[in-house]
Image (cartoon, coloured by chain):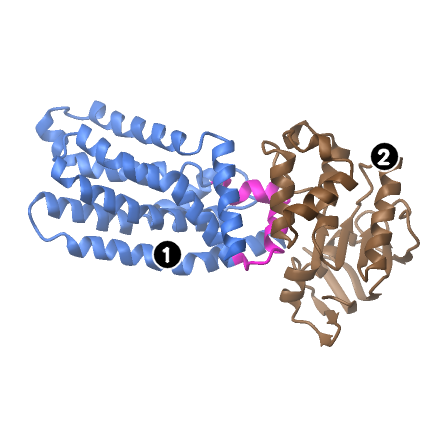
Chain colours: A brown, B blue
Amino acid sequence: MIAALSVRALTLRRGERRLFQDFDLDLAAGEAVALTGPNGAGKTSLLRAIAGFIRPEAGAIVFQGDGGPLEPDEARRAGVHLLGHQDGLKGNRTARDELMFQVRWTGGTDATALAASQTLGLARLLDLAVRHLSAGQRRRLALARLVASPRALWLLDEPLAPLDAQHRGLFGELMAAHLAGGGLVLAAVHDPLPIAARTVELAG
Amino acid sequence: MRALALIFRRELALAWSGGGGPLLAIGFYAAVATLVPLSTDPSVHNLAGIATGVAWVALALASLLSLERMFERDFEDGALDLLMLGPAPAEAVAAAKCLAHWAVAGAPLALAAPLAAAALGAPLSLAPLILATAAIGGIAFAFVGGTGAALALGSRRGGMIIAVIVLPLLSPPVIFGGGALTACAAGMPWQGGLMLLGAYALGAAAICPFFMAAACRNALS
């Protein structure tokens, strides 16, 4: 279980361009950080580097467990949820099939998946094909996997964008519950998060 | 193991839900196998001589069909991120995808191959060996093809690139499988070809998952 994330002197490069240099970040259990910065500052790249998809040019990304540093790939496979711009849902499958697969794949069960779909108001949509859902409904379906599978570190890329005011509030409550249970949230946002969060700015 | 069963079942469901799954591959296979006699001397004597060869080449072509979607679909909609952050290593995910591809396209094609060969005039006594070589060769096609599909990730016109990468690599199994059939038809020992075919399939299944995983990581970075 990931208890803390520390990013030390991280330098990321995309193609010819250096996004940022010597970036430090500490995130402890129960803490949320809102990552802000102009377009192109490297918010998405930072999240993908923490998730292990982008290899940093320099610096270290360390996942701390209760008893010391964790093996990074194992920590990612068992403890990281990445929710990017895309929801990773197949249009021609039903919402139920996609949710059940994603939840089981990330370590949850059918029961937790159904409970999460209730929480997010998806129960009546589960038998529809994903392509018939609106952008906001698809995002809620993707959020259901976060709630349903026990992974400590949530890496969220613009999680609020397609959500309406009511569901932004609901998602705030879900994040608060996740933090209260010892979770960690790192979210790249342009709008303020609906919960108390430390703001870290990427200068760009 | 549970995770692999999960991904295998998902791939099967995806193959069936979009694009007809095995029916498409078999339809294409039947079309290619039917075109060949139209392009050459259609006498029974001539066709019987090339029947097994035609059956095999059509098999290699038909197995290319749905390769493009193997990784591209998950890459485009972001699901590949999720697959890479699951409980199983990327190599195992890739292997499960190839096995599912074989189950949906390779195995039905293997069942169709003896029929196609018989329709072209190959002796019925060859049917069991055609089935065996097509089934084993299909595994090689799936793993080598998957490697091509992963390497072509993110490129436009990926299907053409896959064909250009994969077809040369399919020549050994075509030689071994077709050779075993020709030898058997001529009453010569054919076991060697079958064993070489099996060795190629096993080698592909052992090595290709590492290539596919590396290519996926590269595409996502």
Check residue B204 in the rendering and tell me which mark sits there, or answer none. 1
Check residue B175 in the rendering and tell me which mark sits there, or answer none. none
Pointer 2: residues within 10 angstroms few (<14), some, or many (20+)?
Answer: few
The majority secondary structure of the magenta stretch comes to helix
User: Is residue A29 visible to us here?
Assistant: yes
Residue type at mark 1 is Ala
- Residue at (64%, 46%) from the top-left corner? A110
Camera-side residue of A114 and A128: A114
Quarter of the C terminus of chain B within the rendering = bottom right
Residues in magenta, as a range: B68-90
User: Is residue B77 visible to us here?
Assistant: no
- Residue at (73%, 70%) from the top-left corner? A62
| Count of picture labels | 2
Residue at the disc numbered 2: A164
Residue type at mark 2 is Asp
Q: Is residue B76 magenta?
A: yes
